Image: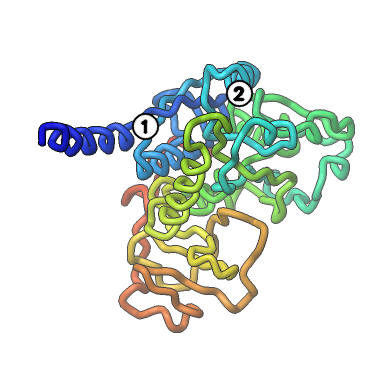
C-alpha cells in the first residue's frame, strides 16, 4: 500500500518536472528578430511563447553568430530560436516549420526608382545596410553596388534623406510598421519597393540528440499554428492584420487583431510567409474565430475604426518607429 501511495505521489512530481524544463538556446543580434535584453526581438518573443505553451522555459544567450554555432555544435547550447536552414546544419539539427521570414525591401527617397529586383540592377548606387546583419553572401559579394554599413535603420534613413546614400535595404517587417504607424511620413518622403531582394525562412532548431527532440519540434509547430489564429502573432508583432493559412487548407486568410477591422478592407498587411498569395478579389478574413469570404460579408459590427495593436497613440511600443 505504501509503495502504491508513493507511486501516485511521484507521478504528479514527474509531470510537474516535465512541464517546467529549461531549454538552453543561443542567438546573435539580428534586429528586429533578435536583440540584447531590453530591446525588442520579435522572433525571440514568438519562440518563447510557443515553447512555454509546450512546458519549456527558454534560457537565452546572445552572442556573435560564430560563437552561437560553435556552442551548438559543441553542445554548450541546445539550439537556436533564429536559424536559416542549410544542408550541413540539418545533419545535427532538427528544424521547426518556418514561423517568420527575413525579407529585404529596397527603399529610396520619394520619386526614386525602386523597381530593381537585385543589386546587379543598381550599378554604382550607394546602398545603406546594417553592419553585421545576416543579409546573406549574395549581398556581400555583389560588386555592382556600393554598400555602406550603418549601425541602425534610423541612421541609414538619415543618410538616405540627406543624400549620403541612394537607397537602403530594410526588412519588410519594419516596412509594415511604417505603413501602419507612419503612413503620412512614408507617403511624403519615401518610395518602397514591391518585391523582396532576398527571402529567408526563419526556424527554431534544436540538436537531434536532445531527449524527445522530435516531440519538442512537433509541439512547437502546433503551438505556432495556434498562435497565428488566436491573435498572439498580431499582439507580439504589434500589427492589426497578418496573413496566414490558419486552417491549413492552402488558402490564406487575413487575421485581425481584436474586433475593429476598419471602415474599409485593409490596404496593407504583413505576410507571415510569401510562398503563396491570395487571389486578387478573393480575400478571406479571419475575425474572432470565423472565416469570411470577402469583405462584403464581414459583419458590420466589425467595421469600426481601427484600434492599433500597440496602443491608442498609433505608435508601436517596439521601438521600431523611425524619425523623419
**Sequence order check, earlier mark of 2 and 1:** 1
**Residue 179: x and y, percent?**
53, 53
> Which label was assigned to residue 191?
none
Question: Which residue is drawn at the image coordinates 61% and 70% (left, top)?
Answer: 278
**Residue 236: x and y, percent?**
41, 45
Question: Which residue is drawn at the image coordinates 34% and 73% (left, top)?
Answer: 302
| Residue hosting label 1 | 57
Question: Which residue is drawn at the image coordinates 46% and 25% (left, top)?
Answer: 24
Q: CA distance from mark 2 to mark 1?
A: 31 Å
Closer to the observer: label 2 or label 1?
Answer: 1
- Mark 2 and mark 1 residues within 8 Å of each other at the beta carbon: no
Q: Residue furthest bottom?
A: 297
Is 178 placed left or right of 280 in the picture?
left
Q: Quick one: 156 or 14, which is closer to the camera?
A: 14
Would residue 321 be visible to someone looking at this image? no
Determine whether the residue tagged by mark 1 lies in a helix, strand or loop.
strand
**Residue 180: x and y, percent?**
48, 53
| Residue hosting label 2 | 151
Is 40 placed left or right of 272 in the picture?
left
**Residue 171: x and y, percent?**
62, 42
**Location of the C terminus (image quadrant):** top right
Amino acid at each position: 500500500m505504501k509503495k502504491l501511495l508513493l507511486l501516485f505521489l511521484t507521478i504528479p512530481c514527474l509531470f510537474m518536472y516535465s512541464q517546467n524544463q529549461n531549454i538552453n538556446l543561443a542567438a546573435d543580434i539580428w534586429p528586429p528578430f533578435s536583440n540584447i535584453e531590453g530591446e525588442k526581438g520579435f522572433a525571440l518573443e514568438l519562440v518563447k511563447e510557443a515553447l512555454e505553451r509546450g512546458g519549456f522555459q527558454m534560457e537565452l544567450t546572445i552572442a556573435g553568430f560564430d560563437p552561437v554555432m560553435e556552442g551548438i555544435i559543441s553542445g554548450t547550447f541546445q539550439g537556436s530560436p533564429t536559424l536559416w536552414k542549410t544542408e550541413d546544419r540539418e545533419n545535427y539539427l532538427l528544424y521547426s516549420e518556418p514561423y517568420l521570414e527575413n525579407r529585404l525591401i529596397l527603399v529610396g527617397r520619394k520619386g526614386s526608382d525602386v523597381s530593381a529586383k537585385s543589386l546587379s540592377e543598381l550599378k554604382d548606387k550607394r546602398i545603406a545596410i546594417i553592419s553585421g546583419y545576416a543579409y546573406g553572401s549574395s549581398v556581400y559579394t555583389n560588386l555592382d553596388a556600393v554598400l555602406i554599413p550603418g549601425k541602425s535603420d534610423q541612421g541609414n534613413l538619415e543618410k538616405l534623406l540627406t543624400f549620403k546614400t541612394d537607397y537602403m535595404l530594410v526588412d519588410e517587417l519594419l516596412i509594415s510598421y511604417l505603413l501602419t504607424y507612419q503612413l503620412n511620413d512614408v507617403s511624403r518622403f519615401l518610395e518602397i519597393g514591391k518585391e523582396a531582394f532576398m527571402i529567408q525562412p526563419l526556424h527554431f532548431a534544436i540538436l537531434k540528440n536532445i531527449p524527445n527532440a522530435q516531440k519538442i519540434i512537433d509541439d512547437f509547430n502546433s503551438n505556432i499554428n495556434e498562435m497565428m489564429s488566436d491573435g498572439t502573432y498580431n499582439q507580439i508583432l504589434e500589427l492589426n492584420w497578418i496573413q496566414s493559412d490558419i486552417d491549413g487548407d492552402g488558402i490564406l486568410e487575413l487575421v485581425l487583431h481584436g474586433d475593429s477591422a476598419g471602415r474599409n478592407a485593409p490596404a496593407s498587411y504583413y505576410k507571415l510567409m510569401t510562398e503563396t498569395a491570395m487571389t486578387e478579389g478573393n480575400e478571406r478574413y479571419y475575425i474572432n474565430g470565423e472565416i469570411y469570404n470577402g469583405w462584403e460579408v464581414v459583419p458590420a459590427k466589425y467595421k469600426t475604426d481601427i484600434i492599433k495593436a500597440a496602443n491608442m497613440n498609433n505608435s508601436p511600443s517596439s521601438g521600431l518607429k523611425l524619425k523623419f
